[in-house]
Image (cartoon, rainbow, N blue to C red):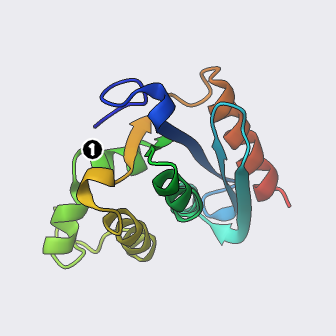
Amino acid sequence: MNTPTSAHSIDRVLAVYTDGACSGNPGPGGWAWAVAPGGDPRGSGGEGRTTNQRMELVAAIEAIRTMGPVARAETKRLVIVSDSTYVVNCFKDRWWVRWKANGWRNAKKEPVANADLWRDLIALYEAHPEAERPDFQWVKGHSGDPMNDLVDQLAVAESQK
């Protein structure tokens, strides 16, 4: 997995931070994304009854849906930066490949949780040529990263509407 400073020079990367939030689990939730380093453009929204994991997935979906075409047009590598190991590890460890091969069942032979959103996210991911697919990078949440803090605040605000 590439990071914004690894195989690609920093000016050839479009880093988009994402986050999801939920008040109760399930409960009212919010999602947000914002482009580094300044936080614009950005997007956010929410749902009345959802889970934190679903909001993390929606944030990544909306970020790729909106910023994927921009990254392509600017010939930049899209990097989704998330504090969700659920999202990041799916791509880092290629869980999605096994899920698809197993009929959207996990290693325990149970239906994959949130398969509807995973299908959407994987379809967006696979729509990019393999060499141009988004990278996913983990950032520790609530650790003082200004962009992670921004998307967290936006997602929490959406969950409180």
- Give the x, y percent position of residue 124: 41, 68
- In the picture as drawn, the residue positioned furthest to the top comes out as 144
Residue at position x 43%, y 30% in the image:
4
- Give the x, y percent position of residue 130: 24, 57
- Give the x, y percent position of residue 95: 23, 56
- Give the x, y percent position of residue 122: 35, 67
Residue at position x 54%, y 65% in the image:
65
Q: Is residue 106 above or below residue 134?
A: below
Residue at position x 68%, y 71% in the image:
49
86 or 134, which is in the foreground? 134
What is the tally of numbered marks visible in this picture? 1
Q: In which quarter of the image is residue 22?
A: bottom right
- Is residue 106 visible from the viewing direction of this image? no
Residue at position x 71%, y 50% in the image:
42
152 or 64, which is in the foreground? 64
Q: Quadrant of the C terminus?
A: bottom right
The residue beneath circle 1 is 92
Asked whether, in this view, residue 156 is left or right of residue 62, the answer is right
Per the image, label 1 sits on a secondary structure element best described as: helix
118 or 17, which is in the foreground? 17
Callout 1 crowding tier (Cα within 10 Å): few <14, some 14–19, many ≥20: some
Q: In this view, does 50 lie above or below 43?
A: below
- Is residue 85 visible from the viewing direction of this image? yes
